[in-house]
Image (cartoon, rainbow, N blue to C red):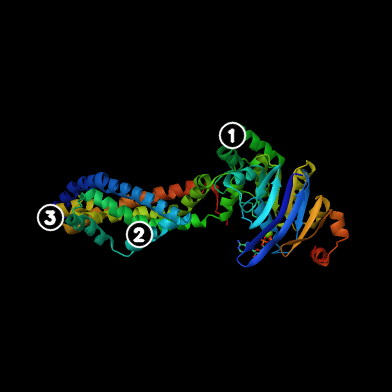
Amino acid sequence: MMLEVKNVQKRFDHTEVLRDISLNVQKGDVVAILGPSGSGKTTFLRCLNFLERADGGEMVFDGEHYDLHKATRGEIARVRKKTAFVFQNYNLFLNKTVLQNVTLGLTVSGKMKKQEAREVAVNALERVGMAGHLDRYPAQLSGGQQQRVAIARGLASNPEIIYFDEPTSALDPELIGEVLSVMRKLAEEGMTMLVVTHEMNFARNVSTRVMFMDGGVVVESGAPEQVFNHPQSDRTRQFLKNFTEIE
Amino acid sequence: MNERLWNILVDSFPKLLGYGVTVTIPLTVISFALALIISVVVALIQYADIKPLIPICRFYIWVVRGTPLLVQLYLIFYGLPSVGILIDAFPAAVLVFGFNEGAYMAETVRGALESVSRGQMEAGYCVGLSYMQIMRHVVLPQAFRTAFPALSNSLISMLKGTSMAATITVMEMFRQATVINGRVYESLGLYGEVALIYLMFCTILTWVQHWAEKKLASYGGTKA
Ligand SMILES: Nc1ncnc2c1ncn2[C@@H]1O[C@H](COP(=O)(O)OP(=O)(O)OP(=O)(O)O)[C@@H](O)[C@H]1O
Ligand SMILES: [Mg+2]
């Protein structure tokens, strides 16, 4: 098992946002996390990367055990080194070029030589089809291009797993495809990914597993055919029904 | 214009300009550098929420903004000697100008820091950077760019404000004009002349500001 998450709990003020979320991920798994707005999907992902500090829960990641509530700085650094996070609104460094966005982490925190970092970065950018825009600034790119650069930034550190939080939700409809196809390619190459998404086609056709959350609990999880075709719970059925109606 | 006045103006011009270049401008530059350091430190303390130091920053800003610059100058230069603290006129002026403008600039810098989206910080953490590294490579450069126009305005207003140092005996450009005027009694001509030199300095600064803003704009609009 590459990632085992147990009993993640998180509350904001007086609302319980996550109640005992658990999840097991094998190497090469692509887990699609579905659920209505406010169900805690983002919070869950953020807890796994310590962008949010969970109130309880543990994680075994890459053979090491972590307490999600009490993890030390060193442990947090170790986790972040082996993971990448792709945000809904890209969060590219606005004052850095495409190339610098990808190399910054490598040279500053990874202490990589400039030339080597450049090669790694160009390679990562090639994988997302953005190596032709090395010297552009984020503001000069479309949303889809920015998101692809953000994915390359994540890839450059050679992560064990990539977390995606609604990577296409901020995009104009005509730009969604280019990002999804990059993600599909990564999935085919065997990259382990946790993907919060509202893209039902992606969840159905690319993911190896679907996890449906509502109200801070995992309502249902299983193979995509099973969850989509034979949902066990009414809430899942209702959610999927609303979605197919929208689509 | 009569010939006497013309001669006075022609004689005094290089003198005034000389004091401008050798006193007013250094006074401005040194005071501004001090103000910049103070403002960044104060703004960072507030941005990073360093709790024990925040009341001190608030107090400092409150006092400086609530008292007139002229009174501050008098207090430091004429007032402090009576408790045994003697500061020469020039450094006294630097201290007052630096701490005075620093309080206003701190608010500018803090606003600029807070305008940098939180996502920049989070993205930095996710690629393995530390808080300090993110501040240095990502947040501060973006904040500086946002703050640049307001900071330039502070610099320009400080340049003009240094004329107040005349009141605590600093022999800068304006005081030199009053000294010459004391001999020749040509207030309109001399003060007009000195106004013109200030105008010239400020115009040059404005040009430099516009040029620098264009350079800084190279990475495009700041997006939320
Ligand atoms: N920093 C915060 N402070 C207080 N409440 C928060 C905070 N972040 C999230 N919440 C609350 O926690 C709940 C879960 O939020 P979360 O963003 O994880 O949901 P989500 O499933 O990602 O929803 P969406 O599909 O809209 O992105 C929501 O009710 C939200 O209002
Ligand atoms: Mg969310």
Q: CA distance from mark 3 to mark 2?
A: 39 Å
When the figure is inspected, residue A76 is found, relative to residue B167, above or below; the finding is: above
Helix, strand or loop at disc 3? helix
Kindly indicate whether the residue at mark 2 contacts the one at mark 1 (C-beta within 8 angstroms). no
Placement of the N terminus of chain B among the 4 image quadrants: bottom left
Which dot marks residue B179? none
Please give the residue where the numbered disc 3 appears in the rendered image: B182
Placement of the C terminus of chain B among the 4 image quadrants: bottom right
In front of the other: A50 or B101 = A50
In front of the other: A122 or B124 = B124
In front of the other: A126 or A233 = A233
* Residue type, numbered disc 2: Tyr
Q: CA distance from mark 1 to mark 2?
A: 43 Å
Please give the residue where the numbered disc 1 appears in the rendered image: A112
Please give the residue where the numbered disc 2 appears in the rendered image: B60
Query: Given the image, what chain letter belongs to the residue carrying mark 3?
Result: B
Characterize the local packing of mark 2: few (<14), some (14-19) or many (20 or more) Cα atoms within 10 angstroms. Answer: some
